Image: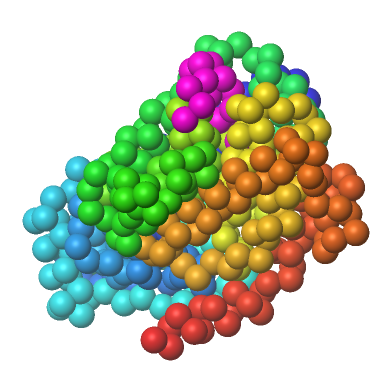
Amino acid sequence: MKGQKILTILERELVVALGCTEPVAIALAAATAKSHVNGNIKEISVKASGNIIKNAKSVGIPGMSAKGLDFAAALGAVAGDPEKKLEVLDGLTKEDELSALELIEDGKVTASQAETPKRLYIEVIIQTDQQISRVVISDNHSNITLIEVDGKAVFRGGCENIGIQTDEEEIEDLSIDQIYEWVVQVDLKDLAIVKKSIELNRVIGKEGLSGNYGLNVGKTLQENVKKGLLSDDLATAAMSLAAAGSDARMAGSTLPVIANTGSGNQGIAVTLPVVAVAEKLQVPEESMIRAVALSHLITIHIKSKFGRLSALCGVTAAGMGSSAAIVYLLDGNLQQVKAAVQNTIGNVSGMICDGAKAGCAMKVSTCSNVAVQSALLALNAQEISSTDGFIHDDVEKSIESFCKLGNEGTRQTDELILKLMLEK
């Protein structure tokens, strides 16, 4: 694969996102629907796939105290700017929140599960006293496939069945070998988006450590280091910074992040464990940037097969990318990079996704710890054997097995998780 193609993939999959991407996508659909009709809102109807409901039900929305699918739709309709895409909720005020809550209190907003086989599907219908509009987003958080006004399609587009932004044929030949070769020789100036991901995501990590967000997972880890109950080592540094970023993001911080393959939380989990280890080791900035690029690209490679939403936690894929990057920071070779990925697959592959929420920071912490552990094992010539579980001798085949587990082996699990969540 030519270097320019890899750079294009990187630039397409790393985008700025404000807020958890599932409620943001609902807000985007609602904002788009409202922008196509005149008059006062009489009714907003939201229908979403089970995976969207899981991740939008309980997670915080930037700068707001309320949560939920209905609130995200109402907020997008009254104040969202559809031109901002995944930053649609940027700049909103408490007055906007009150306007959205008023719609809900007046019984004008309904939310339900859509009858669809798609894992990522959002449909918003807005009826005003003058017109009615319908917007559909599918397969990708910003992929608008249909806009209707008064029953007539005014836009049909988007891409069907896309797991990531990049075209399938452009990414199908990607491999860890090619990624590693490219990362070690690419001109540093071509990695500006990676540097930006470090800068933005580090800010939200530091915010989580200094503020009071969610379960305060990252902050609590750091405080226990000061008490002498935890060691001030690579694993704790990686866990605390990454978890703190997730703490802040899941609790509704207004700080933007660089998302990886549509997930801001995954973007945090791909970058911050690597940044924490790099800072702990005091490596040159160039080494840190190249390591984070490796983490991003390996995660993109895995997610291109895994899909955007699954019954398995996407942060596990980020842990695989981070483990490879930590090996790179510790001067490991390509074979050790692959071994670290193998070790991570063998460790966290069964972690389920039960929706976006404050507790996601604990999963980020777990996967960050595993990333460090897997890297150190690999550097010590320890790698999970192909006789164990579904691990193969070839890391690419192990990745394929992991992705099959997420795509084919967990559909019933996905349905049960959603049922258990909605029974509360």
Above or below 341: residue 330: above
Q: Is residue 401 left or right of residue 96?
A: right
Looking at this view, name the residue that lies furthest to the left: 95
Q: In which quadrant will I find the N terminus?
A: top right
Identified at 51% across, 78% down, the residue is: 418
Residue 144 versus residue 378: which sits nearer the camera? 378
Instruction: Report the front residue among 74 and 300.
Output: 300
When the figure is inspected, residue 355 is found, relative to residue 140, above or below; the finding is below
Magenta stretch in the rendered image? 280-295
Q: Is residue 391 left or right of residue 161?
A: right
Outermost residue toward the bottom in this view: 423
Instruction: List x then y, in percent, for residue 69.
Output: 34, 68
Image location of residue 412, percent across then percent down: 66, 79
Image point 36% across, 62% down: which residue?
358
Please state the total of marks drawn on the protein image.
0
Can you say whether 211 is above or below 325 in the image?
below
- From the viewer's side, name the closer residue of 227 and 279: 227
Q: Residue furthest front?
A: 228
**In magenta stretch: residue 284:** yes
Whether residue 18 is visible to the viewer of this picture, yes or no, is no
Residue at (53% x, 12% y) in the render = 189
User: Image height check: is 409 above or below 299?
Assistant: below
Rendered location of residue 192, percent (x, y): 48, 20
Decide whether the magenta segment is chiefly helix, strand or loop. helix
Quadrant in which the C terminus appears = bottom left
Q: Quadrant of residue 116?
A: bottom right
- Residue at image location 63% in from the left, 47% down from the top: 373
Query: Any magenta on residue 383?
Result: no
